[in-house]
């Protein structure tokens, strides 16, 4: 299967698609997993807010929602990862980084969720952040 990129309700062009696909695949392989159908869907705040309300019962903006489509412990991971480009742009300013850096962090964050990482507690959030940093160090663009 493949990692694919789509847009929903926005005009957005992802830079370095092939490099990012290779990087994300290598993150999965390093975690001992194969990539099945992994779809990244880039969208607006409004679109992602609607998903957040409908599926998670959260009436808040978010930068990402990950919907796994593989069983825990499976050797192949699949799922849909929705990312708000509006949040990416605002968070890049807030965190004083580039939009590409923020986007890459959020993209790997979604993949880490598919790999079984969680970020509900403070300790889990710290572990997730460290995992993101390790993965980002693997990216060469």
Image (cartoon, rainbow, N blue to C red):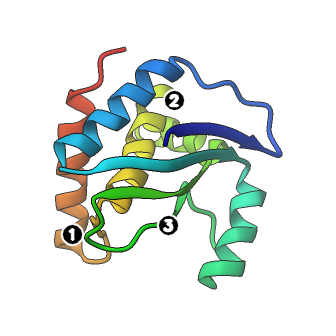
Say whether residue 50 is left or right of residue 61.
right
Q: Position of residue 112 (x, y in %)?
A: 32, 55
Out of 132 and 67, give the one closest to the viewer: 67
Residue that appears at 57% across and 45% down = 40
Q: Residue furthest right?
A: 9
- Residue underneath mark 1: 124
Residue 92 — which label? none
Q: Work out whether residue 133 can be spotted.
A: no
Q: CA distance from mark 1 to mark 2?
A: 25 Å
Say whether residue 60 is left or right of residue 125.
right
Which class describes the residues within 10 Å of circle 2: few (<14), some (14-19), or many (20+)?
some
Q: Which of the two labelled residues, at mark 3 and mark 1, occupies the earlier sequence position? A: 3
Q: Secondary structure at mark 1?
A: helix
- Residue underneath mark 2: 99
Above or below, 43 relative to 136? below
Q: Secondary structure at mark 3?
A: loop
The quarter of the picture where the C terminus appears is top left
Out of 90 and 106, give the one closest to the viewer: 106
Above or below, 12 relative to 10? above
Q: Position of residue 127 (x, y in %)?
A: 17, 60
- Residue underneath mark 3: 69
Q: CA distance from mark 3 to mark 1?
A: 22 Å
Q: CA distance from mark 2 to mark 3?
A: 28 Å
């Amino acid at each position: 299967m493949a990692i694919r990129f789509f847009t929903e309700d926005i005009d957005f062009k992802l830079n370095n698609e092939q490099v990012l696909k290779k990087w994300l695949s290598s993150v999965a392989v390093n975690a001992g997993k194969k990539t099945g159908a992994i779809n990244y869907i880039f969208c607006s705040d409004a679109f992602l807010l609607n998903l957040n309300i409908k599926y998670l019962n959260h009436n808040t903006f978010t930068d990402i929602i990950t919907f796994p489509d593989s069983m825990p412990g499976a050797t192949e991971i699949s799922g849909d990862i929705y990312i708000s480009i509006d949040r990416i742009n605002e968070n890049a300013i807030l965190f004083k980084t580039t939009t590409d850096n923020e986007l890459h962090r959020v993209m790997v964050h979604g993949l880490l969720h598919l790999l079984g990482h969680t970020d509900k507690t403070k300790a889990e959030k710290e572990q997730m952040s460290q995992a993101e940093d390790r993965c980002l160090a693997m990216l060469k663009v």
